[in-house]
Image: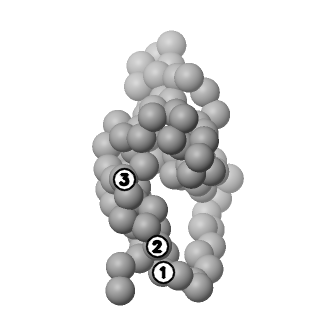
Amino acid sequence: MAPILDVRDLVVEFSTDNGTLRAIDGVSFDLNEGEVLGLVGESGSGKTVTCRAIIRLLPSRRARIVGGSVKLAGEELTTKGEAEMREQR
């Protein structure tokens, strides 16, 4: 059975005045129907950025997904347009 959420090698970067900051570097996990997933880590470790990247609501225009895949029920989310993402959310 395929996972309901499949995140593979997710990479998120922020453009800053001092260059590029890689906030998420290669995060991967599966979430199957009926499962619960907890993200645990220190403050600033990327938990919120990971979650916001999955639903494509990054906290700044300076943040962007630069690599990886996010599939919800087999559909790739990283390439969907904004209108399609609003529907998904």
Q: Which label is found at residue 4?
A: 2
Tag 1 or tag 2, which sits nearer the N-term? 2
**Residue type marked 1:** Asn
| Closer-to-camera residue (4/26) | 4
Q: Which label is found at residue 71?
A: none
Tag 2 or tag 3, which sits nearer the N-term? 2
Real-space CA distance between mark 3 and mark 1, rounded to the nearest whole angstrom: 16 Å
Which residue has dot 1 on it?
32
Tag 1 or tag 3, which sits nearer the N-term? 1
Question: At 64% from the left edge and 34% from the top edge, which residue is drawn?
Answer: 59
Give the SS element for disc 3: strand
Q: Which label is found at residue 76?
A: 3
Real-space CA distance between mark 3 and mark 2, rounded to the nearest whole angstrom: 12 Å
Give the SS element for disc 1: loop
Which residue sits furthest right?
Answer: 43
- Find residue 35 and report its image quarter: bottom right
Q: Horizontal and vertical percent for residue 18?
A: 47, 16
Q: Horizontal and vertical percent for residue 76?
A: 36, 53
